Image (cartoon, coloured by chain):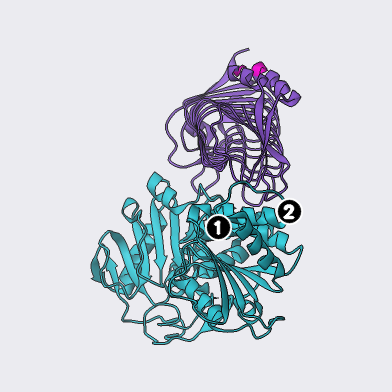
Chain colours: A purple, B cyan
Amino acid sequence: MRPLILTLKKDPDRRIDLSGLVPENLQGRSEKAIARLPLDLSQDPLEVGDIFRLRMGDPMSLRFEGASERFDFVGAGMASGEIILDGPVGAQAGRLMRGGRLHIRGDVGPCAASRLAGGFLEIDGDAGDNLGGPLPGEMAGMSGGVVIVRGDVGPRAGHRLRRGLLVVEGKSGKEAGSRMIAGTLVLRGRLTGAPGPLMRRGTIVLIDGDCLAPPMFADCGSHRLVAASLLASELERLGLGFARKLRRPLRRLAGDMSVSGKGEIWLA
Amino acid sequence: MPGRRGEGRHAKAWIEGVACSLDAAVEAALARLRESRHPLFAGLGCDMDGTRSLVRLARRVGASIDHLSSTATGLELAVARDMGSFFTTPGEAVARADTLLVLGSALDGTGTELLDRVFETAPKLAARGAPRRVIWVGRPLKGKARSSRLEITSLQVPASQIATLLAALRARLAGRPVGKASISASRLQAVVEKLREAQFGVAIWCSPPQEVLAIEALTGLVRDLNGHTRFSCVPVCAADNAAGVAMALTWLTGFPSNIDFSQGQPEHDPWRFDAARLARSGEADLALWVSAYRDHWPDWADEVPMIALTSRSDGARRPHALVQIAVGTPGVDHDTVDYSSASGHLAFRRATARETIPSVAAVVDRFCAALIEPGKALR
């Protein structure tokens, strides 16, 4: 069945909340009902029909033709189906996502994948600060699922990561993996500063890692880890060719010693 | 009520740089506020009364609010909220602290006042008779604190290394190994022993924090030290009543800064409701800039039409402000309640040179009164 297509009519004059435009919320709604969904509840409200032209199809497969940096909460809370979006988006894309597949063919703003709990989020461009991290007042970040960023990421990627897999193919901003609780953060490109400050548990994998030995991590020597080959298989399944490097012996650092020393950095 | 609220007839006001009466300026500002789609209230350098009035107005017009130093204050609050922390008051620190851990690199004018007090006095209620121990981290200590009452250990590291040094201290406190730190292992151990021996330890730093990571590392260290002894923190707050405004915003809206009322209820987001971002992106079409304590303007002032309520002391009018109204300085021109960093709580201050110039609250209350139109629902 054809996908449901939303074509951007004009750039919005304000930030809009796209959390209502997720597959399970659109199922069973008519074209008219979808066009009446609110995007902004200010004194001068906006509806879907004011911003998008609709071409009806299967709402479980949603396509956005055209996007704006002012789109916030794209795919937020989605539990099933698929969303594909061309262009950049704003803050908190994929926030609280539980399932399904969200593919953004552009850059995303800060707090993308914030507290993502399941599903698959793919970002072709760059991501802003605090990728996968919690919002103010929340205790933990991403708690499941898979996120792949093809471009660069801002500071504190994987902040307070609790579970799940986060892969960054480009460069990482400072303090990647800060205060990680558990989970896996794979960083392929160059880093700014030392990774994993104040991490409690979890694994940070540095591919071709030329990381300065962070003073709070203890060198545990070179190993061939069973966990590394399991991770390699998982990454290969996701089409990430660099995973083969995990099948070679790798150096393991334990830390952050100031917190508990139970986290680890692999230099593959 | 002239004097108390300071509403007077000799106010200075300008419309597009041309002097006018206060009434004309208020009318011009009201016209702008009425037609604005997304106003932004920024600066918020004002006392408690002013903050209350601004929140009332923001609710009515659906504005975003961003505090002047929300980034610094917000980061600090974020660390306390995420990790929990141990705080004490400046008074307790002066009276009881036998050991001080000072992050010296960012201490500016506001911080030195408290430091002078702890450096120049002996702890009256200390359990131990020995001189105060000071562990000074960061920039070298200049001139200050040569007193015989003090026993100073200076750990000179660049600002970027403070977090690592504190983390190393925390690791050694727990008996875990540390890689190559910026000071020798024996020195590190000696400092850890000093911290452990404290009977009433206090960590002091200044609000515009060096790095959030340094504050996180310090908070963690203080938490671990409380497993051995009593240790707490005294953050010296930013200028312009930053802590007071953050408190008032929290009790009025639930959030300390970066609040938006456009959707009807208060919403908080440090990025979406950041004043500089809102002004530069064109999302806000009008700014209400408030700076009653000093002559201060944002670096994005030219990027959005602006109504400014500024301190009277500024001689130069800013022609780019659509409307500018001079307001009284709290505690100088009118009586005030604001946050006192010397005592660590809200305090009443009587006007020192009472003038008939309106306070922020008086001007904003006039906006509020005019914007409640009978029969028209304004949020």
- Determine the secondary structure under disc 2: loop
Res B175 label? 2
Q: How many marks?
A: 2
- Determine the secondary structure under disc 1: helix
Question: x, y percentage for residue B276?
Answer: 42, 51
Asked if residue A83 is among those painted magenta in the image, a careful observer would answer no
Q: Kindly tell me whether residue B123 is visible in this rendering.
A: yes
- The quarter holding residue A133 reads top right
Res A265 label? none
| Residue at image mark 1 | B74
Q: Residue furthest top?
A: A1
Question: x, y percentage for residue A63?
Answer: 55, 22
Asked if residue A238 is among those painted magenta in the image, a careful observer would answer yes
What type of secondary structure mainly makes up the magenta span?
A: loop
User: Closer to the camera: disc 1 or disc 2?
Assistant: 2
Q: Residue at (65%, 17%) from the top-left corner?
A: A236
Q: Residue at (57%, 60%) from the top-left corner?
A: B256
Question: x, y percentage for residue A242?
Answer: 59, 19
Q: Which residues are magenta?
A: A236-240
User: Disc 1 sits on a residue from what chain?
Assistant: B
Rounded to the nearest angstrom, the CA distance separating label 1 from label 2 is 33 Å
Crowding at dot 1, Cα within 10 Å, few <14 / some 14-19 / many 20+, comes out as many
Tag 2: amino acid:
Gly
- Image quadrant for the N terminus of chain B? bottom left
N-terminal of the pair, mark 1 or mark 2, is: 1
In the rendered image, the vertical position of residue A121 relative to residue A197, given as above or below: above
Q: Viewed as shown, does residue A222 lie left or right of B106? A: right
Question: x, y percentage for residue B122?
Answer: 60, 84
Tag 1: amino acid:
Gly
- The quarter holding residue B43 reads bottom left
